[in-house]
Image (cartoon, grey):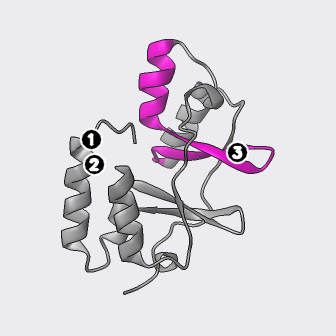
Amino acid sequence: MSQVKDYITKNIETVNVEENLETLAKKMAKQDIGFLPVLDNGNYVGVITDRDIVIKGVAQSLNTAQQVMTKDVVTGYSEMETDEAVNLLQKHNIYRLLIVDDNKITGVVTLGDLGKENADQLIGKVVSTVSDSNSNN
């Protein structure tokens, strides 16, 4: 089995906790992404999704990343086996896994990325589980 490092997207865009949601939405639209890690003084403190911006931000009249981000960030590491990453995604009902090595964000891996591996059964199971959950990711 291969390792996550073979599938991660590196050099991902990050945002600061104080950035406003309109700026974040424009970044997401420009890069055609739906997920941004949130930093505070260079340390990751959460993630924000396009859904967070709409459901939490717009619907509740909130303005900053800090107000709507998901704080309990599930992370993986580059040397992690792909099946371990898939199991982690399933366990936490998420589609994306932030990759952190030596306390630095090194990238992100998604179910789609891991689908390149011969993990069709695991991916299908995770998608089914995540889709049935009330997760906001």
Earlier sequence position, callout 3 versus callout 1:
3
* 92 lies above or below 100: above
Magenta part of the protein: which range? 32-60
Q: Amino acid at mark 1?
A: Ser
Helix, strand or loop status at disc 1: loop
For label 2, the residue is 130
- Cβ–Cβ under 8 Å for marks 2 and 3: no
Q: Position of residue 101 (x, y in %)?
A: 66, 69
Quick one: label 2, few (<14), some, or many (20+) residues within 10 Å?
A: many
- Is 43 situated left or right of 50 in this image? right
- Cβ–Cβ under 8 Å for marks 1 and 2: yes
Residue at the spot x=64%, y=25% of the render? Answer: 64
Work out whether residue 97 or residue 22 is closer to the camera in this orientation and state it.
Answer: 97
- Is 115 situated left or right of 104 in this image? left
- Is 4 situated left or right of 89 in this image? right
* 116 lies above or below 88: below
Furthest-bottom residue in this view = 1
For label 1, the residue is 133
- Is 87 situated left or right of 4 in this image? left
Helix, strand or loop status at disc 2: helix
Q: Position of residue 106 (x, y in %)?
A: 63, 66
Q: Amino acid at mark 2?
A: Val
Quick one: label 3, few (<14), some, or many (20+) residues within 10 Å?
A: some
For label 3, the residue is 39
Q: Amino acid at mark 3?
A: Leu
Helix, strand or loop status at disc 3: strand
Quick one: label 1, few (<14), some, or many (20+) residues within 10 Å?
A: few
Residue at the spot x=34%, y=49% of the render? Answer: 93
* 123 lies above or below 118: above
Work out whether residue 130 or residue 29 is closer to the camera in this orientation and state it.
Answer: 130
From mark 3 to mark 1, how far is it between C-alphas?
27 Å
Furthest-front residue in this view = 91
